[in-house]
Image (cartoon, grey):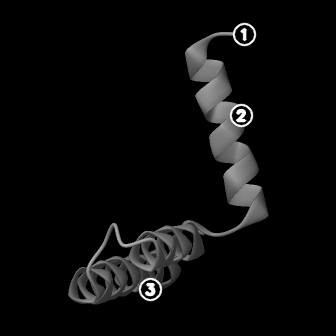
Amino acid sequence: MSNEQKEALLDWGISKLTSRKLLVWITATALMVVGGLESADWVVISGLYLGGQSVIDAIVKLKGLE
C-alpha cells in the first residue's frame, strides 16, 4: 500500500469518526492542556477555523453543492 493510499484511508477514517472541526478543536485543546499552546492562541485557532468552516458550510448549502 502506497503512502497516498494510507493517507487517503486515514483521512477517510478520521472523517467517518469525527468532523474536522471537532478534530481541530480537540487538538488545540490538548495542546493547550499540555502547555504547547497559549490560551489566547487557542481562542484564535478555534474562532478562525470554526468560523471559517461555518461560512464554507453555509455557502455549500446555499449553492446546493451538498
- Please tell me which residue lies in front, 64 or 7: 7
Q: Amino acid at mark 3?
A: Ala
Q: From this view, report whether residue 2 is shown above or below residue 56.
A: above
Name which quarter of the figure residue 42 lies in.
bottom left
The numbered mark, 1 or 3, whose residue comes first in the sequence reads 1
Residue 18 can be seen in this image: yes
At horizontal 33% and vertical 66% (from top left) the residue drawn is 36
Q: Where is mark 1, residue-wise?
A: 1
Per the image, label 3 sits on a secondary structure element best described as helix
Q: From this view, report whether residue 12 is shown above or below residue 23.
A: above
At horizontal 36% and vertical 73% (from top left) the residue drawn is 35
Which residue in the rendered view is the most extreme toward the front?
A: 35
Q: Nearer the viewer, mark 1 or mark 3?
A: 1
The numbered mark, 2 or 3, whose residue comes first in the sequence reads 2
Q: Where is mark 2, residue-wise?
A: 9
Q: Left or right: 64 with respect to 32?
A: right
Q: Where is mark 3, residue-wise?
A: 58
At horizontal 63% and vertical 44% (from top left) the residue drawn is 11
Q: Amino acid at mark 2?
A: Leu
Q: CA distance from mark 2 to mark 1?
A: 10 Å
